[in-house]
Image: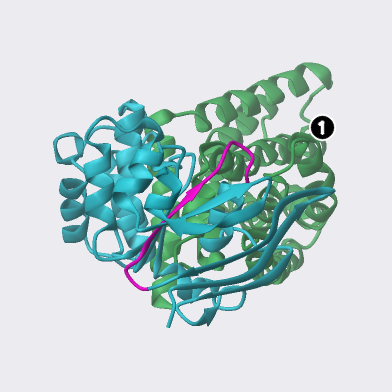
Chain colours: A cyan, B green
């Protein structure tokens, strides 16, 4: 059973075609990089895969379940890092995770473990609004893996991370399927086995990492 | 069910903690209602004869506009921080999330009423009694449910400040009519207080159920 099985995913915003009949398959434990220039449709594709948006047409199965009908069930299996960190600035890093943990039904022990994993244990009690942009991104990544999801969807998570960011991403992606949108081909090459290149919403085809780098 | 209650309380606690630390809304709302009462006090010729007639209208005007601000902020802040989507991408029930947001917004409006009602008694010389407080609290419940539903609906559109009153105010009218009658009687006018309060309870039940059913469709894209 594939983790992701997408067939002819299409997304229209009024007259604009953001995603044009994209097919995608991701197997268990596989890491896929989605590459493309700004406006290529990477975020649209990832939002659909994360069940944050519904496609205009096409079919999507995640873990063998219909992603349009089983959204709440699937959300327990998916971790999503969006463009914006989406944190509560007045709450501390730990309180942010505790809050999202309560929505996932995850205990406090897992919060401490996650803060350690993303390297924020030292600033756990600092309000999220006073964390640096990179630390906020680490916290958003922590929130995405808090409930130990089987599929991780990362939309340009490296945008504000420091030099240790790639190691952090490797750690959180380890042992789970992942889709990573990035402009950084070297990062995609290091973290993912396969790539999908988008241009103007259309897939230019999937390939191995070597093919893209060449 | 227990899980949904836990989620609702977690959401409400999060909103109240954020407000307690930032103090963005309640102090501003408190100032607004006091200023509204002061302006009304100067604008009307208040005397012992007409105070009980004018005061209920002033009370509901101040409460309605304070409510629009309080409920509007409940979802606008989440949208601005892009945190609503993060919340909705959990397995938590959207209805429970909505209930938590409405509960927190209602409690913030009640905090504002703690300033409003004594200020009204002070400036208009009207009685401050349990019957008056009960009527206002009962109206707050239904108004919070409706206000939060429409706030969630318009939070993603640019003209939300204009749309929220246009959508919400017509549906708040039943609360203003029944609540207004209950408040007038509590302030000494003739009429049936029990009948007005029973109507308020009916409206509360009706709109809490309806908004809970609609919340799922409003919050879940």
Count of numbered labels shown in the rendering: 1
Q: Quadrant of residue A166?
A: top left
Q: Who is closer to the viewer here, B58 or B123? A: B58
Q: Is residue A155 visible?
A: no
Q: Residue at x 80, y 41 (%)?
A: B163
At which x and y percent is residue B112?
Answer: 55, 37
The stretch of residues the image draws in magenta is A28-41
Q: Residue at x 34, y 69 (%)?
A: A150
Dominant SS in magenta: loop
Can you say which quadrant of the picture contains the C terminus of chain A?
Answer: top left
Q: Residue at x 19, y 34 (%)?
A: A123
Can you say which quadrant of the picture contains the N terminus of chain A?
Answer: bottom left
As drawn, B121 above or below A182: above
> Does A30 appear in magenta?
yes
Is residue B60 rendered to the left or right of residue A210? right
At which x and y percent is residue B11?
Answer: 44, 55
At which x and y percent is residue B135?
Answer: 65, 55
As drawn, B165 above or below B103: above
**Which residue carries the number 1 mark?**
B49
Q: Who is closer to the viewer here, A20 or B95? A: A20
At which x and y percent is residue B180?
Answer: 77, 50
> In the orientation shown, which residue stands out farthest toward the front?
A214
As drawn, B39 above or below A56: above
Q: Quadrant of residue B6?
A: bottom left
């Amino acid at each position: 059973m594939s983790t992701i099985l997408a067939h002819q995913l299409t997304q229209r915003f009024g007259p604009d075609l953001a995603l044009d009949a994209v097919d995608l398959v991701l197997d268990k434990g596989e890491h896929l990089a989605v590459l493309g220039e700004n406006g290529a449709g990477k975020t649209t594709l990832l939002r659909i895969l994360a069940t944050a948006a519904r496609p205009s047409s096409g079919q999507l199965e995640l873990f063998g379940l219909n992603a349009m009908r089983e959204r709440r069930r699937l959300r327990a299996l998916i971790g999503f890092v969006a463009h914006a960190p989406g944190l509560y600035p007045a709450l501390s890093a730990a309180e942010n995770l505790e809050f999202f943990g309560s929505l996932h039904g995850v205990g406090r022990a897992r919060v401490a473990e996650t803060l350690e994993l993303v390297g924020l244990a030292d600033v756990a009690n600092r309000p999220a609004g006073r964390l640096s942009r990179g630390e906020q991104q680490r916290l958003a990544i922590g929130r995405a893996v808090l409930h130990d999801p089987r599929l991780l969807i990362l939309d340009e998570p490296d945008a504000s991370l420091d030099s240790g960011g790639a190691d952090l991403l490797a750690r959180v992606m380890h042992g789970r399927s992942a889709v990573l949108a990035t402009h950084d081909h070297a990062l995609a090459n290091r973290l993912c086995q396969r790539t999908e290149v988008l241009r103007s919403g259309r897939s230019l085809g999937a390939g191995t990492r070597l093919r893209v780098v060449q | 069910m227990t899980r949904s209650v836990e989620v609702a309380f977690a959401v409400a606690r999060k909103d109240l903690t954020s407000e307690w630390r930032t103090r963005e809304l309640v102090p501003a709302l408190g100032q607004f209602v006091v200023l509204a009462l002061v302006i009304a006090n100067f604008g009307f010729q208040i005397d012992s004869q007409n105070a009980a007639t004018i005061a209920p209208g002033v009370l509901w005007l101040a409460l309605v506009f304070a409510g629009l601000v309080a409920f509007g902020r409940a979802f606008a802040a989440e949208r601005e921080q892009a945190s609503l989507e993060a919340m909705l991408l959990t397995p938590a029930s959207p209805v429970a999330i909505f209930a938590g947001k409405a509960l927190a917004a209602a409690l913030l409006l009640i905090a504002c009423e703690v300033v409003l009602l004594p200020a009204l008694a002070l400036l208009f010389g009207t009685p401050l009694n349990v019957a008056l407080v009960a009527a206002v609290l009962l109206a707050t419940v239904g108004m919070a449910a409706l206000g939060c539903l429409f706030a969630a609906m318009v939070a993603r559109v640019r003209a939300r400040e204009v749309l929220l009153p246009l959508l919400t105010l017509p549906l708040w009218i039943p609360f203003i009519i029944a609540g207004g009658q209950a408040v007038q009687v509590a302030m000494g006018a003739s009429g049936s207080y029990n009948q007005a309060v029973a109507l308020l309870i009916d409206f509360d039940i009706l709109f809490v159920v309806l908004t809970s059913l609609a919340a799922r469709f409003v919050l879940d894209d």
